[in-house]
Image (spheres, rainbow, N blue to C red):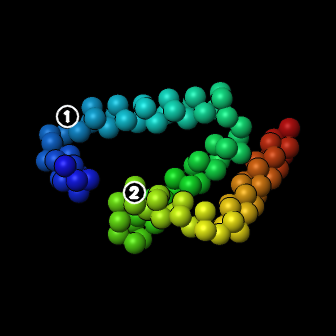
Amino acid sequence: MTERNMGGVFAARERESKDSYLEAYFANVLDELTSDLKHATHDVILRKLLLSYMSLYLAQTIGVDYHAATEELYYLLRKDDGKNSKIAHIIAKFEEKIKKQESGMR
């Protein structure tokens, strides 16, 4: 079954069925991020979240599914290391902002 068909099947479900399906996957995402917090550094987690956002944005913008957008994103990153540097720069900016906010709270 293609992803487009799976979306159609999901849309046809009853609200209660959709809710339980969404609740399960919502919990899975939170569990995965919680595990990442325990086992990965904050910059790895920020990179993961940023790349996920970029993939979703590409999927919506160019009209492909999320998996295809992720593949295209990783192709770009392998092709041009400067893009990895830009991502690292954005992560550093996130970290800088977080540190400023934390120091302002003290």
Give the amino acid type for the residue marked by disc 1 in the picture.
Glu
Q: Is residue 83 left or right of residue 63?
A: right
Q: Which mark is residue 66?
A: 2
Question: The C terminus lies in which quarter of the figure?
Answer: top right
Q: Residues within 10 Å of mark 1 (few under 14, many from 20)?
A: few
Above or below, 81 relative to 23: below
Q: CA distance from mark 1 to mark 2?
A: 25 Å
> For the residue labelled by badge 2, is the local secondary structure a helix, a strand or a loop?
helix
Mark 1 vs 2: CB contact within 8 A: no
Q: Which mark is residue 61?
A: none
Residue at position x 42%, y 71% in the image: 61
Residue at position x 82%, y 50% in the image: 100
Image location (x, y in percent) of residue 5: 18, 53
> For the residue labelled by badge 1, is the local secondary structure a helix, a strand or a loop?
helix
Image location (x, y in percent) of residue 52: 52, 53
- Label 1 belongs to which residue? 16
